[in-house]
Image: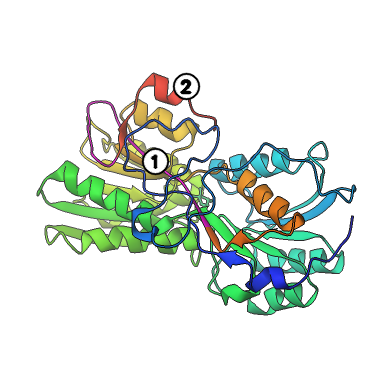
Amino acid sequence: MKKKLAVLLAGTMVMASLVACGGNDAAPATNDAPAAEPAAEDTAEPVAEAEPEAEAEAPAASGGAISVGFAQVGHESDWRAANTQNYQDAFSEANGYELSFVDADNDNAVQLEAVRNFIQQEMDYICIAPIETAGWDTVLQEAQDAGIPVLIVDRSVDADPSLYTTQLGCDMVAEGETAGNWLGEYLDGADAKILVIEGSVGASATLGRTEGFNNIAAQHSEWEILDSQSGDFTQAGGQEVMESFIKSYSDFNVVVCQNDNEAYGAMDAMDAAGITYGVDGDVIIISFDATHDGLQYTLDGKINCNVECNPLQAQFAADVIQKLEAGQAVDAQTIVKDEAFVAPGITSQYAITMTQEVLDGRAY
Ligand code: AHR
């Protein structure tokens, strides 16, 4: 089914909404569906959605499959693999969709070309997980001119919001702040010499986590951020940056890795250099994503604190599309709930203490 929804969807039918954010309410995440509570700071506006509404409703009454083009970032991390699988499951033929999936391999030009191809192919909807925040205005205008609703998913863009229909994903600034707040609580006034392995340059996940962590670091004069370099959200990148940090800095006690794969690389580099880390080691490791393996390392006490970024977001996108199919208003923004997890032996107001039961209850 190739059909054009009215361009009015892009601007006039949106409302502010948050599904949930934070990670500070210490209840184990089960991940069967991103959960839902309004973020405290944003409750003034109507909160229209609480949960993804249904498992794969049938496509609109008109009958044919709904075509969706998905321009995915790439395959840089375990998180990304889980996110891709989640979209492929939710937008299956059995659920009434025809999904065109492009893995842009972290290449902006490839991603832009994929979106232009989707426009040419007159997709019913386009989902973009933007590699970088910048550079989207022109192609988003082209999609709007073609009458194709665009969902910005996972990360965000710095384009005019009237150029796309909705944005959904985790609150990356809040994730960074959770990491910082946990570190402040854990150190309880002790000095920190911090090395940061950032994610991909220009990605909202990187910018947000950095901003959030720095917001909290600014409140701690006893902390010093020694260096901050991109590991590109990959294990190889994390290892390479950590090896170079080890050559440059002999005195550090905190390594912040902006995703789990970077943490695996950083741990390999520290193992090779004979540096101990985790709850029984000299260096505190903070990671982001809380994927299965990342949480196994947290349960094992190797990662001290792991701040979740929930990859199970496709049902939110499907809910938006079903609403548009039904001619209903959709929310301008949906924030997917995150939690945070700490190693056994640590208790925190900001995070859940890992147990085998918590790990077994995870879906990714
Ligand atoms: O945008 C989400 C981030 O992208 C995840 O934290 C990271 O693992 C991925 O590559």
Q: Nearer the viewer, residue 5 or 161?
A: 5
Callout 1 environment at 10 Å: few (<14), some (14 to 19), or many (20+)? Answer: many
* Label 1 sits on residue: 339
Callout 1: CB less than 8 Å from ligand 1: no
Residue pictured at 43% horizontal, 33% vertical? 29
User: In this picture, which residue range is highlighted in magenta?
Assistant: 334-350
User: Where is the C terminus found, in terms of image quarters?
Assistant: top right
Q: Earlier in the sequence, mark 1 or mark 2?
A: 1
Separation of disc 1 and disc 2 at Cα?
16 Å
Residue 306 drawn at (x, y percent)? 36, 40
Tell me, yes or no, whether the highlighted magenta stretch contains residue 343: yes
Residue 135 seen from this side:
no
Q: In the rendered image, which quarter is residue 156 located in?
A: bottom right
Residue that protrudes farthest toward the left in the picture:
189
* Label 2 sits on residue: 360
Callout 2: CB less than 8 Å from ligand 1: no
Residue pictured at 47% horizontal, 31% vertical? 293
Residue 210 drawn at (x, y percent)? 36, 61
Residue 104 drawn at (x, y percent)? 69, 58
Q: Amino acid at mark 1?
A: Glu
What secondary structure is marked by label 1?
A: loop
Could you tell me what secondary structure mostly forms the magenta stretch? loop
55 in relation to 10, above or below: above
